[in-house]
């Protein structure tokens, strides 16, 4: 059987890769893709802890479903913001979005 | 090493390689396609964890909705992503360092956990696990369980929907 630590290591690696994408990418859409990877790592952790610690309970799955809903909301609003910025500034590069920079 | 471990290792390797391609490839449309592969790998991990409903939601929601949304956003902003010389900013070595440090810290934390074993369910419990979807449905609408978080999530989704239309909609 698969030890729990394998799942946690996979989730940690996925989270670290997503974090690198968020920090290093210039394109805002690519940054959002990194965020999606990080959210997936979190959901793997939630489901793995549910299965190993409380498999007959339901709260772990409910938690994962709520995180799915939040991820959908985050993606739609983030992409809407990016498209709106692209219309005004003709750019999706994160470091050029400096209108509010002092 | 039994068969589930071998399957897990193959799926995890594929997922991590495609996730690496997502954050490193220069053509962003290819990056989005690699993202779909990575999300499929995560769905297989959910199947290995015997969470079938979560795996289906992963395929329908993340691959069917979010990945398609990302590809649409890329096409709408395509002038900006036509092969720029640099797809990473000047701080990428520090970012790689931070990401590697967070991976080491997180895996270090897992070594403090007790050695939880895969709970081998009795036959009645196993039936309960397969009837989990019904339980999940009841739990989401019962007031003494998760009705309130469910309603809050619905409100969040409708607010995000209206907000996205308001932000991205064409101004007359």
Image (cartoon, coloured by chain):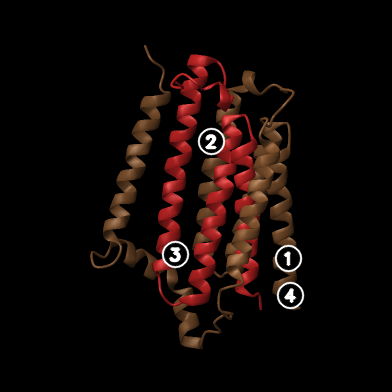
Give the SS element for disc 4.
helix
x then y, percent, for residue B132: 44, 71
The part of the image, by quadrant, that contains residue B15 is: bottom right
Callout 2 and callout 1 share a chain: yes
Q: Chain of mark 4?
A: B
Q: Quadrant of the N terminus of chain B?
A: bottom right
Q: Quadrant of the C terminus of chain B?
A: top left
Measured in 3D between alpha carbons, the distance from the residue under mark 3 to the one under mark 1, in whole angstroms, is 24 Å
Q: Colour of chain B?
A: brown
Q: Nearer the viewer, residue B60 or B157?
A: B157
Q: Chain of mark 1?
A: B
A44 vs B132: above or below: above
Q: Residue furthest top?
A: B172
Q: Colour of chain A?
A: red
Tell me the residue that label 3 is attached to: A61
Tell me the residue that label 1 is attached to: B9
Tell me the residue that label 2 is attached to: B69
Q: In the picture provided, is B93 more to the left or to the right than A62?
A: right
Callout 3 and callout 2 share a chain: no
Q: Chain of mark 3?
A: A
Q: Chain of mark 2?
A: B
Mark closest to the chain's N terminus, 2 or 1: 1
Q: Nearer the viewer, residue B98 or A81?
A: B98
């Amino acid at each position: 059987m698969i030890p729990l630590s394998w799942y946690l290591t996979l989730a940690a690696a996925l989270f670290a890769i997503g974090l690198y994408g968020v920090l290093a990418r210039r394109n805002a859409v690519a940054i959002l893709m990194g965020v999606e990877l990080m959210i997936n790592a979190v959901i793997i952790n939630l489901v793995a802890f549910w299965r190993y610690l409380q498999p007959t309970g339901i709260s772990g799955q409910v938690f994962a479903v709520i995180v799915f809903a939040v991820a959908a909301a985050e993606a739609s609003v983030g992409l809407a913001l990016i498209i709106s910025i692209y219309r005004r500034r003709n750019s999706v590069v994160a470091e050029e979005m400096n209108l509010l920079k002092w | 090493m039994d068969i589930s471990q071998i399957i897990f290792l193959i799926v995890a390797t594929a997922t991590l390689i495609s996730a690496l391609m997502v954050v490193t490839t220069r053509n962003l449309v290819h990056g989005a396609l690699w993202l779909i592969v990575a999300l499929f790998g995560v769905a297989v991990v959910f199947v290995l964890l015997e969470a079938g409903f979560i795996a289906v939601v992963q395929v329908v929601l993340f691959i069917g909705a979010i990945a398609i949304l990302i590809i649409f956003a890329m096409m709408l902003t395509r002038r900006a992503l036509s092969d720029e010389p640099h797809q990473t900013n000047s701080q990428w070595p520090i970012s790689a360092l931070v990401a590697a440090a967070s991976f080491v810290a997180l895996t270090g934390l897992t070594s403090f956990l007790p050695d939880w074993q895969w709970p081998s369910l009795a036959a009645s419990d196993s039936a309960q696990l397969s009837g989990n979807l019904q339980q999940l449905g009841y739990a989401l609408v019962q007031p003494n369980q998760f009705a309130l978080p469910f309603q809050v999530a619905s409100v969040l989704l409708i607010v995000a929907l209206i907000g996205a239309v308001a932000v991205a909609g064409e101004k007359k």
